[in-house]
Image (cartoon, rainbow, N blue to C red):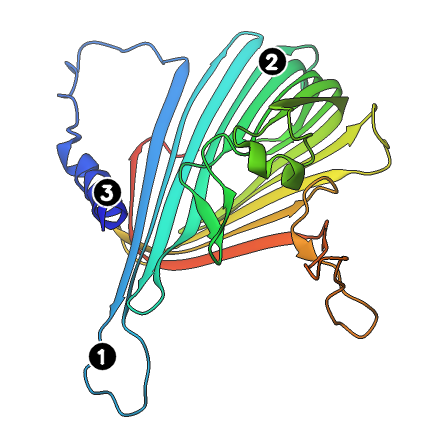
Amino acid sequence: MKKILFSLAAALCLTIMPALAQDKPAADSAAVKAPSNWTKGLLTQIGFSQLSLTNWAAGGVGSISLNTYLDAYTNYKKDKYLWNNELQMGYGFIQNFEDGYKKSDDRLIFDSKFGYKATDKLYLSAVYNFRSQFADGFTGTDLTSSLMAPAYMSLGLGIDYQPAKNLSINFAPLTGKTVMVAIPELRSKYGNADDQFCRFELGAQLKVDAKLAVKDFTVASNLQLFSDYLDNPLDVKVNWDVNVDAKISKLFSVTLRTSLIYDSKIKSAIKRDSAGNPVLDGDGNNIMVAGVQFKEIFSVGFSYTIGQKK
């Protein structure tokens, strides 16, 4: 119940934030304000559903679900320099009145990019990324994730090519990446040794950010590919996030968010034989292997943007 109240309180805060934001008084018409080198914006989204059944002959289970998402950014650009920063936070749950509380979404992502303009469309760049989650995650009753378990942090040096306003292709041939798992029992699941809190990787990263905006319809894609020089460079790790937003009105929208992950170090799938049956170890337990992870969240609800749109 505490988790539910916390989630609802967070959603309420996101809802009232736009109401508290007030426009600044208009400047004197005689004064000419210099253009700012900063662009800032904040997007908040909340989707909620509730189902209640009483003596319902056809059967079913009552439930409450909530999805919240926040995307804040602040970018700087002047002369030959740029500095882009973006923070994404999302949390969702389903409270099934028979099976209890389950987490449906949980993300904490921070991206930062610094660039120095070398040519018209090419920048020398440094790219930083941090990715984790807020709360405990479970498969059945087994703990599978928590805050900083795992967490990924990377810093890459390379070039950033921007052939169009909403397209950035970043190649960092020198990228250091750390995989942190704070809970010892979960370390082997994410490729770390049982006594290894932090595992270091050194390789090359390709990051492609693209956005398509047509009136009230927006699609944003973020693709990251990483090859580890120190451990099988041909084994490429994939992180691909896609956000789709279609405005219904000024305050409501339909959103679709998907995430695809492949990392051979993460044991997320049950090993099966050619007939599709689980393969068991000597103790009769399922053998876990790497697999493609995919998550999709569809929501209809409140949406509000403060500041400038990206």
| Mark 3 to mark 1 CA distance (whole Å) | 25 Å
Left/right placement of residue 230 relative to residue 185 reads right
First in sequence, mark 2 or 1: give its number. 1
> What is the total number of numbered labels drawn onto the structure image?
3
Tag 3: residue type? Phe
**Could you tell me residue 261's position as x and y percent?**
64, 46
Q: Residue furthest bottom?
A: 57
Label 3 neighbourhood size at 10 Å, few (<14), some (14-19), many (20+)? Answer: few
For label 1, the residue is 53
Residue lying at 27% horizontally and 11% vertically, measured from the top left: 33
Relative to the observer, which residue lies in front, 54 or 301?
Answer: 54
Tag 1: residue type? Leu
**Could you tell me residue 270's position as x and y percent?**
69, 59
- Can the viewer see residue 104? yes
**Quick check: 245 above or below 37?**
below
Label 1 neighbourhood size at 10 Å, few (<14), some (14-19), many (20+)? Answer: few
For label 2, the residue is 115
Residue lying at 66% horizontally and 37% vertically, measured from the top left: 188
Name the mark nearer the viewer: 3 or 2: 3
Tag 2: residue type? Gly
Callout 2 secondary element: strand
Label 2 neighbourhood size at 10 Å, few (<14), some (14-19), many (20+)? Answer: many
**Could you tell me residue 187's position as x and y percent?**
62, 34
Residue 6 disc label: 3
**Which of the image's four quarters has the C terminus?**
top left
Left/right placement of residue 243 relative to residue 276 reads left
First in sequence, mark 3 or 1: give its number. 3
Callout 1 secondary element: loop
Residue 248 disc label: none
In the rendered structure, are the residues bearing label 3 and label 1 in contact, judged by CB atoms less than 8 Å apart? no
| Mark 3 to mark 2 CA distance (whole Å) | 39 Å
